[in-house]
Amino acid sequence: MEVERVQAIASISKIIDTIPPEFIRSEREQPAVTTYSGPVPEVPVIDLGNPDEESVVRAIAEASQEWGIFQVVNHGIPSEVIQRLQTAGREFFELPQEEKEAYARPPDAESLEGYGTKLQKEVEGKKAWVDFLFHNVWPANRINYRFWPKNPPSYREANEEYVKYLIRVVDKLTRYLSLGLGLEGNVIKDAVGGDELEYLLKINYYPPCPRPDLALGVVAHTDLSALTLLVPNDVPGLQVFKDDHWFDAKYVPNALIIHIGDQIQILSNGKYKSVLHRTTVNKNKARMSWPVFCSPPAELVVGPLPQLVNEENPPKYKSKKYKDYEYCKLNKLPQ
Ligand SMILES: O=C(O)CCC(=O)C(=O)O
């Protein structure tokens, strides 16, 4: 069966200046109706280069409790490395359709890896204005280069270089998140798999959309992962749900956007929040983003950390294998 990619639909939509009805959201979801337009509180921006480590730990812990999302600057990844990652990803999405289809996710594959258009069926039968490419980037034994584009030729090196730096940022963040809970620095990283923590890259490509007031890119969700680190291009679109409103997140050049995912919410017994977020699209420009989902290995059991539960603070979540949590979430079953 021929799969219709949003990129192809977008080129027709541009000519006829309208979008197919399955992309038109109900009023409960339309960005034009549901985006908060008053003064917008800002997603915290945290300077990881600050030598006062205690204040960095405090800022990260506060942001993770209040928002479940923050941006980090001075994170140690050179801007050229990020630019090379972005150029390689953009050049892949600009290839002719048949070339991209060589990387299509095989139907019914167990893994998420590959080029694709839609992961989950939405309740109202609506479609998301986005195409994507998923592939594992770390650890080495989880990588399948069959899903890494050969074109542009710089793709592999650009991604490997980025990941080398990203691992250091993850180590730093998990340490600060542990310290922020009053625990030893290694506790969170160990609880999500230590060196077996899996890094899954997704590239989102949101083509220009004639009706950005009616459509959504990625629909509202929290991430399954422990932690997600995301690089966007300079086209804003990320929205965060806080205090009952949808707020636009500001684009901060060279920042990494950090989402607390479900597994860290569970480990912290609800102290850190897994952020509810979604994306809007742009009328004239393609938006792109490069989230890396850092998740425990499939068989690892994740539950509230024993150090954080007692009689007054009973566990708020079940302890279960990550693969079982993932199955329930992707199939919209109760946990
Ligand atoms: O594009 C973004 O900023 C967010 C992407 C996202 O939430 C996702 O791919 O799960």
Image: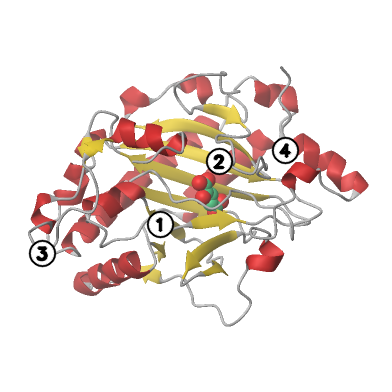
Residue 151 at x, y percent in the picture: 62, 27
Residue 306 appears left or right of 15: left
Residue 82 at x, y percent in the picture: 50, 50
- The residue to which callout 1 is attached is 258
Tell me, for residue 312, which label it has, or none: 3
**Amino acid type of disc 4?**
Val
Among numbered discs 3 and 4, the one appearing first in the sequence: 4
Count of numbered marks:
4
Q: CA distance from mark 4 to mark 1?
A: 27 Å
Residue 32 appears left or right of 170: right
Dot 4, how many residues are within 10 Å of its Cα: few (below 14), some (14-19), or many (20+)? many
**Amino acid type of disc 3?**
Glu
Q: CA distance from mark 2 to mark 1?
A: 16 Å
Dot 3, how many residues are within 10 Å of its Cα: few (below 14), some (14-19), or many (20+)? few
* Mark 4–mark 2 CB contact (< 8 Å): no
Among numbered discs 4 and 1, the one appearing first in the sequence: 4
Q: CA distance from mark 3 to mark 4?
A: 50 Å
* Mark 2–mark 1 CB contact (< 8 Å): no
Residue 69 at x, y percent in the picture: 41, 62
The label nearer to you, 3 versus 4, is 3
Q: Is residue 235 above or below residue 188?
A: below
Q: CA distance from mark 3 to mark 1?
A: 30 Å
Tell me, for residue 203, which label it has, or none: 2
Tell me, for residue 6, which label it has, or none: 4
* Mark 3–mark 2 CB contact (< 8 Å): no
Dot 1, how many residues are within 10 Å of its Cα: few (below 14), some (14-19), or many (20+)? many
**Amino acid type of disc 1?**
Ile
Among numbered discs 4 and 2, the one appearing first in the sequence: 4
Q: CA distance from mark 4 to mark 2?
A: 14 Å
Q: Is residue 65 visible?
A: yes
